[in-house]
Structures are given as structure tokens and as C-alpha cells.
Amino acid sequence: MKTMNLLLSGVGGQGVILASTILSRVALLQGLDIKQSEVHGMSQRGGSVVSHVRIGQKVHSPLVALGGCDILMGFEPLEALRFAHWVRPGGVILYNTDRVNPSTVAAGLAEYPEDVEDRLKGYPADLVRVEAGRLAEEAGNRRAANVVLVGAASRFFDFPESVWLQAVEQSVPAKVVDVNRKAFALGRAAGA
Amino acid sequence: MKEVLSGNEAIARGAWEAGVHYAAAYPGTPSTEILETIGSRYKNDIRAQWSPNEKVALETAVGASIAGARALACMKHVGVNVAADPLFTASYTGVGGGLVLVSADDPNLHSSQNEQDNRNYAKFAKIPLVEPADSQEAKDFLKVAFEISERFDTPVLFRTTTRISHSKSVVELGGREERPFPQALERDVQKYTMLPAYARPKHPKIEERIQRLKEYGNTCPLNRVEMGDTSIGIISSGIAYQYAKEALPNASFLKLGLTYPLPEKLIREFASKVDRVVVVEELDPFLEEQIRLLGIAVEHGKDWFPLTGELTPEVVAERLTGSAPERGPVAEGLPVRPPVLCPGCSHRGVFVVLRKLKVYVSGDIGCYTLGALPPFEALHACLCMGGSITMAHGINRVMGEPEDRRNKTVAVIGDSTFFHSGVTGLMDMIWNRGNSVVLIQDNRITAMTGGQVTPGIGRTLTGEEAPVIDIEKLVVALGVKPENVRVISAYDLEEIETVLKEELDKPEPSVVITKDPCVLQYRVKGKPMTVDPEACTACGVCLRTSCIALGMVGEGDERHAEIDPNFCTGCTVCAQVCKFDAIRST
């Protein structure tokens, strides 16, 4: 297969890293090469977090090149827009519609732009809106929004659904497997 | 068996496979997970420990090596500065069991105070340098590094960067090379006692060792030639190689894994087979300068690739291919998400008070360095681990006893940083009759790096019970008067202010200690506070505590503060700054 380049952008605490782990496990289960990179450190303290995932026959760089992203998974609209220029023309911007206010907005030092979704439409990419929070709640836990997004992204890969579910099971704690399986399924249906 | 591992996890695995018996480190991004992994996955075979600082960690590893065990010490790039003293002389003594020092550098300063290129240490200390380019190599090369260490009787510097340490890729796992723990301790005074008479003859020996290593590099399995299109020959190592290979997969490559000393013959041969040589490397022109000194024409190096920051695949590709892909515009004017103190953080109240007191705050390395950012701007200098106390003392030495309290100094330091290298600074301040206030924010953990135990909490890396190093008793033993050691709550703003004022007015050193634990690592979550919209005047004073649980909602007369109960831990700091009693416990 041609190498798939994904960027996962969000806010510390949204489960970007777990979503990246699931994608990596799927690739490994499919016998493919995988490189994944993110920077941890100060990100758990409310900062922007971005993870690069590359899946293919042989992957060299762990980073997706600017302008070479096939699928941008935005865990938050503003964070999708922040990385929208990374997406190649004809790529996919898949994003969660739930807002998380930056600390600067909460403190009254900045405004959350009202036109984020309109500005996303200006990029030459296919937009996929996912109400990940609502779907995760429907699955049983709002915190599974990250797995909803993985489900939505799974539509763009030719991997069997059973392999995805196996990767989800390997990546989440045993007591929340069922919620996450549901979240994945709802996301996969929403990613159409 | 295959697994997806980060570079750090792969190094830990490599240590296990290499039969390492001892590993020590001080936590520091991006190196921390190496010891965390050893301490959890491999603790039955490797005796592993956090040390109070990097110098201590390396010295203990030298000891284990003298005893005959394979030993590993791990640290971030600036940690090697702390450990440089034993490193340079361990180069002279050589090793018993193999000794490898991992330096995890942080180009682009993702979580660091500078972006020094630690490859230079190898040349400076005259020891071999090994650089992996992905997780598989991180594991495999570490094993070769131990062989080099023993074969050439030298410590080996094993250098990664954030993109190697924190990137994950597929690793084929191997078994452990079983080696017995050392039984008898051999004595070799001339080898390990660096008196001038014994050290002097070592210097020519290490110069000769470098020559032998240079020869070894020509056939060493860590260096590899990948001949392809000979119109361009790329010499590279580490992450830079991956970006170059991605850009020009069919070019000819000399991919170096042993990057000091450089294999002269191999480089000359490679250069003679290609039309032009391009050196691709991150940060300093470490390879380029040495290759140019061989008299080899380097067509492009640092004229193409930046001296600062991380390389990126697009920067490397644009230079090597001469073209850039089509891209959409960068979205301008978006609000940023800077890192902030967590809701309920035990540093918040202290910075609210320090801002109010307008004293000069000499800071240190930890989450509390965020006190320098708006809206606090209540931390005025931060240099290095432990530097808060000593800088405060230096300022105090030349300022004398200021009339205005604003010219007085407060040093703010965390528990782990105090144990690391704050203790000697406090000794200095006491001995030399300083009079600053040292505020030790003991949050019972090394928080910034993700929550590692400290000498103060009675547990080791591997979870065993341990004696508690008691900060209060320690500072009194050093000579701070018992009445000048004050333990206060990090959440009582009035108490913080009163005590700081009292201690600032004393003509001798004081130590003020808070002991409230890190809310993130200890999962502290009390009942959330709420805002009474009627009482709230939307004045915004609460927002100046910089808490992401707080925000303003509504317009006009309806505008008021609001607290997100999912984030709020009920720490009450915002309620204490509210002048209208509008924020209350539920």
C-alpha cells in the first residue's frame, strides 16, 4: 500500500496518544511498517498536542512532511484549523466538533474564533464532521471520543473491522473495552 | 517477536538484551522513559535506580562497571553537563564491565532550557559516539555500544534526540545475553585511581584509542554504505538520515552510526564514488567540519540546513529535491494554547502572592517555571537545576540589605530540584551569611517529567520502601535557624503572604516549605467551587490566577465568571482572590 500519513491534533488530556497507539497496533497487526511521533513534556498541562502517524510498507521519517498529510484528525475544531495547512490537496480533514477553550480564551486574553468551521472549508480537502463527544456519550462514556474519531478514520483504510477492534481491545483498560468497541462502531458509521 | 516501541523503550530493551546489570538516571525530558521502562519491565534482571542527580547516577554506574557489571546511565543533554566531571575522567580510567552513557538531546527545546548538541562531548572527552536512527537501531546499537566499550576499554556516549527517544517504530525483539553478577572485586589501583602519576600516562593511551576506533569505524557494523544514484552522496546520521532517505530514497548514502571518531577511509572511499557530497545533520556542523578537515569537498552542509531547531522532513526534502509540495495557507490569528499550571496546582497560590509582593523571584527548573508567564510574570530568572538559590544569593551579595522589600530575593525551587543540586547552594548561602528566602515547593514528586519518585517520599524507582530524606531536618542540620524554617499550606494565601513577609524581613536565610502534593500525579480532586452569578461583577481578578477551570460567560450585565466542575479541584485560590465573595464551596 501507499504510505498513509496521519496527523492527530488536539489538547492535552483528550486521548490523542491512545488514538495513535490504536493506529500503530492496527498497522502492526496488518504486518505493516509504522512510525509514530509526538512530543510529550508540558502537553498534559492544557497545551496543544500533535501526533504524527505514518503507516506503509517501509517508513523512514517519523514526521509527516508539511503538505503531505493524507488524513488530519482534529480532536477539536481550533486544533484542526491550526494544522489544516499540513493536509495535501485532496486529503481529508476529519474533526470533532466539540470545542475546548484555550486558557487564553478562558482568561479573557483572546477570543475563540467563531468562523473556525467556515475557514476549514477553505482548504482543498474533504471535510468530515464528527460529533465525537455526543457519540461517545451514546457509547457510554464521553471520554471515549478519541476512539470515536479512530472509528471515523478507519473508513479510509482497507483493513478488516475485526483487526481494528482487536487493536482497540489491546489498547484500552479491560473494564472499558465494551464502551470503546461501541464508540469505535459509532465513529466508523459516522465517518461515511 | 515484534513490538512497537519508542526509542526510549527500545534502549531499555537493548540494555536488558545486552545483559546489563545496573542502570541509573535522573529524570529529564526526553530521556525519562528509559529508566521507567527498566524499572518496571526489567527490574528482575537489572538493578535500576533514580539518583538525586546525573553526576551521582553516572558515578554509581562507573562503580558498577569497576565491579565488572555492564552499566548504563541515562540523562537529558543538560544532565551531561552535570555529569561531565566523572565522564571526562572515566574516559581515562576506562571500564571494567561495559559502560554506556545515554544522552537524550532536545533540539527545538520542547522541554529544555537550551539546545546544545551533545555530540561535541564525545570529541571533548575522547570517547566513541553512537547514534541510532530509529527504535530498532536504538536497541541493536546499544548492544554494540557495550561491545565497543569493553573491547576498547572506554565509556561510550550513546546519543539520541527527542525524535528518536519519543518516536515509536517496529522492533524485532531478542533474548537476554546471560551474564553472571560480579562475584569478586578485583583491585587495580593504577587503572582506577587518577592521581597525576597514574593519569598522565593515560592521556597518550586514549589518543591511541581514538586512532584504533577510527580504524574500527571503517568496518564497524554501525556504519553502512547504501549505494544508489551516484550523482549525489549523502552523509548523515540519526533522525537526519531518515528525512534525507525519505526525500531521496534512490540516492547514495553513507549512514553513520559510529559518529565519533569518524571512519576516514570509509568516508574517502564513499566520497570518491559520488559526484558530490552533501552532509545532512541537525544542530552543529559536527560531521561536516570533521569531513572538511579530511580535505574532502562537501558541496552542501550547514549552508543548506539550519544550525538551530529541529530538522523537518519538508526542510530536508526541499533542499535535496529543489521543490516543495503545494500547501494551503497557515491559519493566522488563532489563540494559542500555552502550557499552564493544572487546576488545583500547589504552585498557583504561591505565585499569586509573589506577584502581589513584587519581590525578585529567582526560579528553577520545574512546572513552577511557568510562573514566569503572563498573567503571573512573578518569576524573573531561571538558569539551570539548583540555580535559584545560588543566583538569589549572588544578587543578595551585591545588593546588601535593601530598604525596599521589592529588591529582596526569593528563590523558588521544587523538592526534586532541591535534592538534585539545591542543597549545596543553600549550604553556600548559610555559610556566606546570605539572607534570601528559599521557598521549597515540595509537591512530593518530580512532576514536570511525568511523576517520578524523589528521595523525599520513602520509595524507590522499583517501588521498594526507602528511608525518607526529610527536607525540614536537612535544612536545619545545614544551619538554617529552626525558627526560620516555616512549613505552610500552599493554598492559604494569607498565610503565604504573612510568612513570606516575616521571613523577608529577617537578616538571615529562611526556608519556607509547602508540602501539598502534585494534584496531577496524586489525582487530588476535591469538591468543585461554584460562582454566584448575582454576586460576581465580572471584574476578572479570578482569571488572573490562570486556571483553565475558570472562564467568563454571558454578555453585558449578565457577564460573570464560571467554573468547569470537571476541571475544578476545589483548591479555593480563586475564591480567596475574589473581592465580592462570589466564589464558594458547594
Image (spheres, grey):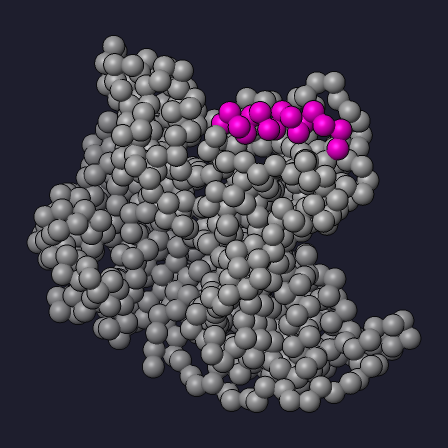
Query: Among all residues in the image, which is located at the extreme front?
Result: B483
Asked if residue B469 lies in the magenta stretch, the reply is no
Span colored in magenta:
B493-508
Which one is nearer the viewer's eye here, B8 or A125?
B8
List x then y, in percent, for residue B76: 57, 58
Direction from residue B479 to residue A128 in the image, left or right: left
List x then y, in percent, for residue B445: 50, 52
From what the image shows, is residue A19 above or below residue B64?
above
Residue B42 visible within the image: yes
Task: Residue at 68% x, 36% y: name it.
Answer: B483
Query: Among all residues in the image, which is located at the extreme right?
Result: B197
Task: Residue at 39% x, 34% y: name it.
Answer: B571
Which one is nearer the viewer's eye here, B579 or B540?
B579
List x then y, in percent, for residue B18: 52, 82
List x then y, in percent, for residue B491: 46, 33
From what the image shows, is residue B434 above or below residue B539?
below
Task: Residue at 56% x, 25% y: name it.
Answer: B497
Q: Quadrant of residue B95?
A: bottom right
Residue B120 visible within the image: no
